[in-house]
């Protein structure tokens, strides 16, 4: 299997599972957004947080060639670690803070 296709499947599974397993302490709903064609994988959170409407990206990863670029990972238990546990090589993960991203 092509590594890029495999990473896309791992990303999709990780993002979908993250939205299922979250505790519902408030009226906030999590949505998985997986666009394998563009290579973007997100978890969106929307809903009422106390008296304020919330609409934010909790997780955003881009699949670029054979690397996963983590733009945001705001989960208490990092989804980046879940990707590694799911079979993604650590060397293929780049965070938005690393200068290597500028070469893509």
Image: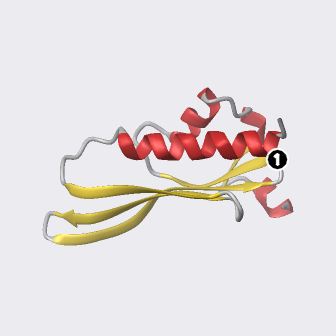
Quadrant location, the C terminus? bottom right
Q: Position of residue 69 (x, y in %)?
A: 69, 53
Look at 76% across and 45% down and name the residue there.
Answer: 5
Question: Element under label 1?
Answer: loop
Quadrant location, the N terminus? top right
Tell me: 35 left or right of 65. Answer: left
What residue would you read off at disc 1? 66
User: Of 98 and 6, which appears nearest the observer?
Assistant: 6
Relative to 42, say whether 78 is above or below.
above
Tell me: 46 left or right of 51. Answer: right
Q: Position of residue 87 (x, y in %)?
A: 68, 29
Image mark count? 1
Look at 66% across and 42% down and name the residue there.
Answer: 9
Look at 55% across and 41% down and name the residue there.
Answer: 13
Query: Would you identify the image quadrant in which residue 38 lies?
Result: bottom right
Q: Position of residue 99 (x, y in %)?
A: 77, 56
Relative to 51, say whether 34 is above or below.
above
Relative to 11, say whether 55 is above or below.
below
User: Of 47 and 1, which appears nearest the observer?
Assistant: 1
Seen as rendered, the residue at the extreme left is 51
Query: Would you identify the image quadrant in which residue 6 lies?
Result: top right
Q: Position of residue 88 (x, y in %)?
A: 70, 34
Instruction: Assess disc 1: are there few (<14), some (14-19) or many (≥20) residues with their C-alpha within 10 Å of its C-alpha.
Output: some
Look at 55% across and 34% down and name the residue there.
Answer: 82
Query: Would you identify the image quadrant in which residue 22 lies?
Result: top left
């Amino acid at each position: 299997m092509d590594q890029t296709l495999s990473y896309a499947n791992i990303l999709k599974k990780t993002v979908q599972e993250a939205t299922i397993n979250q505790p519902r302490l408030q009226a906030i709903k999590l949505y998985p957004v997986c666009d394998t064609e563009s290579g973007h994988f997100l978890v969106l959170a929307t809903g009422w947080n106390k008296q304020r409407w919330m609409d934010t990206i909790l997780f955003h990863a881009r699949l670029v060639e054979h690397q996963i670029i983590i733009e945001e990972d705001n989960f208490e238990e990092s989804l980046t670690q879940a990707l590694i546990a799911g079979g993604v090589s650590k060397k293929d993960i780049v965070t938005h803070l690393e200068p290597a991203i500028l070469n893509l």
